Amino acid sequence: MNLLATIAVALRALRVNALRSGLTMLGIIIGVAAVIAMVAVGAGAQERVNAQIESLGANLLIIFNASSRQGGARQGAGSRLSLTLDDALAIQEIDSVALASPTVAGRTQLIFGNLNWSATTQGTTPEYFPLREWQVVDGRIFGPEEVRRAAKVAVLGQTVVENLFVDQDPVGETIRIKKVPFEVIGVLDKKGQNSFGQDQDDVVLIPISTARKRVLGTSARARPDSVSIIMVKAVSAARLKEAEDAVNDVLRTRHRIGPGEEDDFRLRNLAEITDARAESQRILTLLLSAVASIALLVGGIGIMNIMLVSVTERTREIGLRMAVGARRKDILVQFLVEAVTLSLIGGFIGVIAGLGGAALIGNLADWPVLIEPLALVIAVAFSAAVGVFFGYYPARKAARLDPIDALRYE
């Protein structure tokens, strides 16, 4: 008996028991659909985290002021105000550092015409834009000369533009920041939310000298050249750790911090945050996939159970086929084909259900989903493997039946 004839017999047997075949496939359908949906959700979450981290810029270190003490009480992060403009200049001289940009920031009220908006105003330097890999879509950024003379120029984020300018080009217009007039010279490209859920586009960037002299001022406890944050970009990802160690050494030396003494600054490596979040998302995806795979395993057990029942019900049929010349191999292939067919049909239906489920989760939860073609192929292949694995024992049992005993079976 040739293979095609064996397959035809197997498919005919499945059609005869269509309802039972459908119920048997249900476990495979649910398992494959769950695997695909969970992997898509997990991959989408990881993609979102990576995009948010990358929106901050590549190969970044962020240096914050540390907490100060009054008596025995610690005053909280950023209260020490030990970082200065000269610190940023010294960091810029490190070989493994490509760019360093000091920043001061505060929440201010913006006014244009009869509209107003509260946004974060950041005073910074021209290095900030390439450091953050932040392009302008209209106009230009300010230059070193405008920083030197404390020019009243501003570059706006997209959120600010949307709330202050309605169907109007902001470049060349004048806005007021804390009642100080500023000329809008540029509009930044959209960045979206960062990994902490903050809107990066709700910002106005002005020269750091202008911010200190005209808008934000300086704290009474701070040095005249103190800054809130220094952002540092390493020359490459491979030298990020080298840059981190060098920056730490330079600041400890400049701030006269002795061995064993506590730093008056905090240094954050964004690559470590990226790695930690990527690892957590990878573990989450593996856990979700493991849970979904249990459903696939249960579906495989269901196939084995139904196939064993089918062998018992069709004992006389098997004996009759053997009596008219069917070999043991033909019987084995027939029942294996039945099991694999159930699994493959269930796998294909499961893929469609999984894609639909992933899309539904994405729409209802406003969550990104990422469908990888390789995951679909693996899911279908795995469902076929389940059919072979769980169908082999019933098929082998059928093939080893004694024809005489089978014909006598009632």
Image: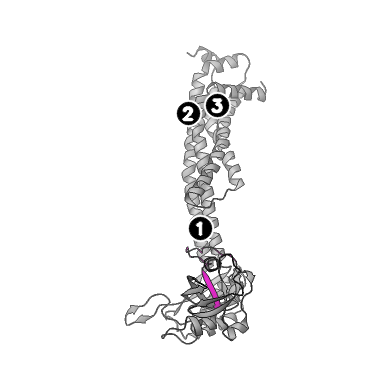
> Magenta part of the protein: which range?
189-206
The coloring applied to the image is one colour
Image: 51 above or below 310: below
Magenta run includes residue 345: no
Q: Secondary structure at mark 3?
A: helix
Specify the quadrant of the image occupied by residue 88.
Answer: bottom right
Give, as a three-letter code, the residue at label 3: Arg
Number of the front mark, 1 or 2? 1
Image: 325 above or below 375: above
Q: Position of residue 316 (x, y in %)?
A: 53, 15
Q: Which residue is mark 1?
A: 279
Q: CA distance from mark 2 to mark 3?
A: 14 Å
- Bin the neighbour count of mark 1 within 10 Å (Cα to Cα): few under 14, some 14-19, many 20 and up: few
Number of the front mark, 2 or 3? 2
Magenta run includes residue 190: yes
Number of the front mark, 3 or 1? 1
- Is 366 displayed left or right of 147 in the figure? left
Q: Which residue is mark 3?
A: 396
Q: CA distance from mark 3 to mark 1?
A: 44 Å
Q: Secondary structure at mark 1?
A: helix
Which residue occupies 59% across, 24% down? Answer: 11
Counting every numbered tag in the picture gives 3
Q: Quadrant of the N terminus?
A: top right
Q: Which residue is mark 2?
A: 305
Name the N-terminal-most of marks 1 and 2.
1
Q: Position of residue 215 (x, y in %)?
A: 49, 81
Most distant residue in the top direction: 408
Residue in the foreground of this view, choosing between 390 and 183: 183
Q: Main secondary structure of the magenta part?
A: loop
